[in-house]
């Protein structure tokens, strides 16, 4: 079977797995940086978490561009990076907004509580990021359309709207000219 000839569910499953692998690395970086900052500095919890999220976003871009979406369109890197940063900023607001609400809205500020709400924020932000990155940032290249599909055995089959044999066109008869 040729690459790219698997069904849409297999492609989506592979994409989700690659996205998840990069996400796990980004999450480890995010948790490591935030917990180090929380325990080794006097930064406020949400500020430290924003810094950790930014570091993770940088790691994730490299992973997404060169691993998860390496086969996607690379022609407009400036636009891609701008959209990635814009959608990542929305994800940052989601993640840190949940942490902010937990700490300043409910007073849940222990180390365990911070990490629990960090997990919740990352989870919700990840759903948003997956949708936005695959829909807007790392766009798929258009599939080459050769006018043929393949059957289960991989044999070419003409598409329904493509005739098997081109009809021959006979020239139209010339109108008779009347000479008076």
Image (spheres, grey):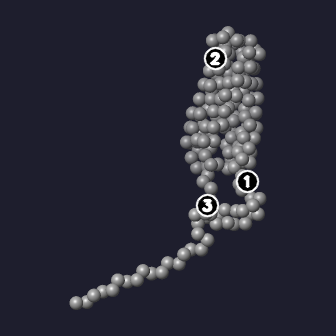
Residue that sits furthest to the left in the current view: 180
Q: Residues within 10 Å of mark 1 (few under 14, many from 20)?
A: few
Closer to the chain start, of discs 1 and 2, is 1
Image height check: is 78 above or below 51?
below
The CA distance from mark 2 to mark 3 is 49 Å
Q: Left or right? Give the position of 35 relative to 165.
A: right
Secondary element type, mark 1: loop
Residue, disc 2: 100
The image quadrant that residue 94 belongs to is top right
Q: Residue sitting at 49 percent across and 78 percent down? A: 169
Q: Left or right? Give the position of 94 relative to 176.
A: right
Q: Is residue 52 visible?
A: no
The image quadrant that residue 129 belongs to is top right
The image quadrant that residue 116 belongs to is top right
- Residue 136 percent location from the top left of the image: 58, 41
Residue, disc 3: 145
- Residue 33 percent location from the top left of the image: 73, 24
- Residue 173 percent location from the top left of the image: 40, 83
Q: Residue sitting at 64 percent across and 17 percent down? A: 100
The CA distance from mark 1 to mark 2 is 43 Å
Q: Which mark is residue 6?
A: 1
Secondary element type, mark 3: loop
């Amino acid at each position: 079977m040729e690459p790219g000839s698997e069904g849409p569910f297999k492609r989506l499953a592979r994409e989700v797995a690659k996205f998840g692998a990069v996400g796990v690395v980004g999450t480890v970086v995010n948790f490591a940086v935030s917990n180090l900052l929380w325990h080794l500095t006097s930064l406020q919890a949400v500020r430290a978490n924003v810094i950790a999220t930014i570091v993770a976003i940088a790691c994730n871009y490299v992973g997404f561009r060169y691993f998860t979406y390496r086969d996607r369109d690379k022609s407009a890197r400036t636009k891609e990076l701008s959209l990635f940063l814009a959608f990542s900023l929305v994800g940052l607001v989601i993640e840190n907004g949940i942490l902010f609400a937990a700490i300043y809205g409910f007073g849940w500020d222990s180390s365990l509580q911070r990490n629990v709400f960090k997990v919740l924020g990352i989870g919700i932000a990840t759903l948003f990021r997956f949708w936005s990155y695959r829909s807007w940032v790392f766009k798929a290249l258009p599939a080459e359309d050769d006018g043929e599909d393949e059957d289960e055995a991989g044999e070419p089959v003409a598409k329904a709207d493509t005739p098997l044999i081109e009809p021959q066109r006979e020239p139209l008869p010339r109108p008779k000219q009347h000479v008076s």
